[in-house]
Image (cartoon, rainbow, N blue to C red):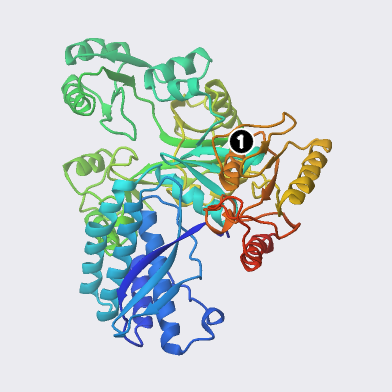
Amino acid sequence: MLKQQTKLFNVRALAFPTNCLENIDKWMLSVFQKKASPYGAEDTQSVGSSEQQMYNIAHRGQQLVNIFLQFANIPAFYAEKNIQIQITEDNESLAIALPVPLIEMVSEKAYEIAIQSAFSLLTWMVKNEVSIENTKRVHNTVEKKIRIPMKNFYVGGKSTLRILQAANDENIPFIHLGYGIYQLGWGGKSHQLNVTGSEQDSITGVVAAQDKVRSAKLLHMYGLPAPQQIIVNSKETATNRVKELGWPVVVKPINCDRGEGVVIGIKNNRTLSKAFEHAKKFSPGAPIILEKEVAGVCHRIFIVNGSLLYVSKRWPISVIGDGQQTVSQLIASNNAIENEKPPWLRSPEYPADLFATEIMKADGFSLEIIPAKNQRVQLRPFESNEWGGSSEDVTNQVHPANLALALKAAKAFGLCNVGIDLISTDISVPWYKNDAVINEVNFSPELGSNSASLSCIPSFINNLIKGDGRIPIEVFVGGNDALKQAKGKHQDYLSSGINNCLTTANLTLYLSEGELHMPLNSALERCRALLLDKKVEAIVLVLQTDEYLMGIHPFDQISSLTEVDNKLTSWKNSGEKIATKRHDVLCEKLKERLSTIN
């Protein structure tokens, strides 16, 4: 697991009563489905049991902070066991220095809210027992006072955190570049991700995929099965031209995603007029798409780097019969299960409204009917973010012709990571035998929203990043002699055909091109700049000052450490030699980074 860079935050908290740790752990498991990890006796063996409990409670607070940061899609996963606690003279409060993962370009306010909320909730937890009523109270508090305020700092997409969690588990470093865009890996082994889209994706393909009309035309030009569409600006035009397609038809807003404003199964002009008005609400002032409806269910074919990741059959929100309960009872049972979950983990409500009953009626069901065991009763016409739904893994059922079709579409759009939505009655049958069509080409599709795709995230990462995505970082510590030895290592790399850079605080030798000028007077900042450069395959870092003890480190691991001499100077006071003890502390901290290499 990745050891993320942390920053110490000062927290003031009331002293906790004795024997409250068990109650906190019950709350952690009940509300957040998290089994709290202990601070560890090995870390507190020199202190008494009451002090050990304080460290363990602060460690629970540390884990809560990470949970609350994750509400904002902030990838805080590491809980460093380097907590510092001081008890005030009156023994009534604690001064805690709490290490929290520091993510680039994240507002300080997000950390403040997460930390204050975590210790405020801890204080409440120790005073209240776990009960149904108290659990509901905590759910409501966390949702309204923590999760919703934290959403103000949310960047990236729904898949971002899941992908970064998997990268963290695989010890792959990542760097936030802003706006939810992350670089996974270092230098020549890195890739940038925006949700699931990468720098390898063609910008022209991205633009085309985000335009339903242009996308369908491009598919047609490539000889691929695409929807038959007519673009209309008024209800009158729609009713006049619908005969060119024939019933049934689908109405879509031209510039919406996730199924917003879409109406299917339109079989007459009266329904068409209502559907047009509905679509206009989502896309006022823009044209509307009139599309020939195709029989079947949407199948998401996820392609990564020219290879199949998975295929899922996307069912609309439904209830599954047990042979005993009516549809109405099944809906109530499913909603009861969802309502027991924290609000942030609940699926959309299972509906029993007029729309649901109309869909049931068309399929031969009603609220009073008892479906057979494992019989599916659909409550909405298709799966969407608004209505919810489920996915069935059908990767092993996809016909080679359908996979070939998806690969060709991905190549036509120049997209590395892409979701091809194929409307088909049977994914095991070739598309040309059952009139299947590519409904949409999805740039940066969501990943991990269901069990089928969640299990594929490690494969997705391994397809992009080789190994742990790290390049060698060799560190030399000392004065001019250290720089001289480092230059020799730099030349050795270049002689071996490895694109290597050497950097100090004010000198960077870039590959074989000579000096690279940077407006930076920091060895660590220059090192970070090189880690972002895809041409760089190795770095020789020369530390000639004590900067490492002050700055934020751009790396969590180094591949080698060479202590040349103790002629380090002060980073703040140029030319002033630092004490031998400070030099030794710096080298010991670097050795900690070295010791994490397998």
Is residue 486 positioned above or below 82 on the image?
above
**Count of marks overlaid on the render:** 1
Label 1 CA crowd tier, 10 Å (few <14, some 14–19, many 20+): some
The N terminus lies in which quarter of the figure? bottom right
50 displayed left or right of 329: right
Residue 186 picture quarter: top right
Q: Residue furthest front?
A: 576
143 displayed left or right of 52: left
Q: Nearer the viewer, residue 579 or 201?
A: 579
Q: Position of residue 443 (x, y in %)?
A: 46, 31
Q: Nearer the viewer, residue 84 or 4?
A: 84
* Residue in the picture at 51% in, 19% down: 224
The C terminus lies in which quarter of the figure? bottom right
Is residue 230 positioned above or below 416 on the image?
above
The kind of secondary structure element at disc 1 is: loop
Residue 224 showing in the rendered view = yes
* Residue in the picture at 64% in, 64% down: 592
Q: Position of residue 265 (x, y in %)?
A: 28, 29
Q: Nearer the viewer, residue 67 or 238?
A: 67
Residue 320 showing in the rendered view = no
494 displayed left or right of 214: right
Is residue 152 positioned above or below 213 on the image?
below
Q: Position of residue 568 (x, y in %)?
A: 66, 56
Residue 49 picture quarter: bottom left
174 displayed left or right of 569: left
Is residue 223 positioned above or below 132 on the image?
above
* Residue in the picture at 38% in, 18% down: 213
At label 1, which amino acid type do we have? Answer: Asp
Residue under label 1: 533
Q: Nearer the viewer, residue 94 or 303?
A: 94
